[in-house]
Image (cartoon, helix red, strand yellow):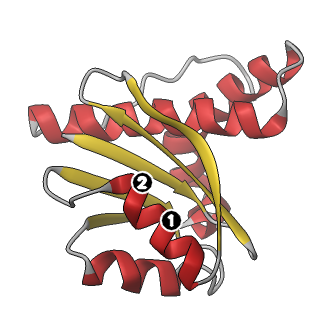
Amino acid sequence: MRFVGIDIGAERHTVASVDEGGTILQRPAAFREDAEGYQQLLAQLGPPADTLVVMEATGHYWQNLFAALAAEGFAIALNNPEHRRIPELRYQSGRGLRAYYQRLRDRGKLPKVVLMAAMRKLLIAIYTVDKHRRPFVPIIPLAAP
């Protein structure tokens, strides 16, 4: 199984992928929000078999890409950033990633590099849930926020 993460932007999106073991198959690469950019992405991704695409549902920017990927037969999971506003979901799903993100930023890593590292962690968590067919139960440190 291959896991593809797509960070959605207004004019450019960024894609990266990992395999079941977390090995990086494709380093972060940008593509444009147009037909040419979509063709570039589809050429990079190859056949949709055994692939799960995880992408943000940010504003309306994700909708055209979602339609293009679905038309090609890709399995797609949407991550809605609006869930950050719900305290229970924020506590369960974002706290560990937020701390990880901040640790890398504190070490001087560039924001886009840190975002891709966090996406990789999220993709590995998704793979683990899929592989073991168990719900995701995050391990959250009890330190104060």
Give the Cα distance between marks 2 and 1: 6 Å
Residue 13 quadrant: bottom right
Question: Number of labelled discs?
Answer: 2
Name the amino acid type tagged 2.
Gln
The spot of residue 99 in percent (x, y) is 70, 26
The front one of 85 and 28 is: 28
Left or right: residue 9 compared with residue 139: right
Question: Could you tell whether 130 is left or right of 63 in the image?
Answer: left
- Return the x and y of residue 114 as percentages of the image width and height: 72, 31
Give the camera-side residue of 36 and 141. Answer: 36
The quarter of the rendered structure image containing the N terminus is top left
The answer to whether 120 is drawn above or below residue 82 in the figure is: above
Residue type marked 1: Gln
- What's the residue at 20%, 74% (across, down)? 73
Residue 110 is situated, as x and y percent measured from the top left of the image, at 84, 30
Q: What is the x, y in percent for residue 123?
A: 40, 39
Q: What residue is disc 1 on?
A: 40
**Residue sitting farthest toward the top:** 107
Q: Residue at x 57, y 64 (%)?
A: 83
Tell me which residue sits at (10%, 40%) in the image.
Answer: 133
Within 10 Å of disc 2 (Cα), the crowding (few <14, some 14-19, many 20+) is few
Give residue 124's quadrant in the image: top left
Residue beneath label 2, please?
Answer: 44
Asked whether the beta carbons under mark 2 and mark 1 sit within 8 Å of each other, the answer is yes
Quarter of the rendering occupied by the C terminus: top right
Q: Is residue 79 visible?
A: no
- Mark 1, Cα crowd under 10 Å, few <14 / some 14-19 / many 20+, is some
- Compared to residue 85, the image places residue 26 above or below, namely above
Image point (66%, 82%), residue name: 59
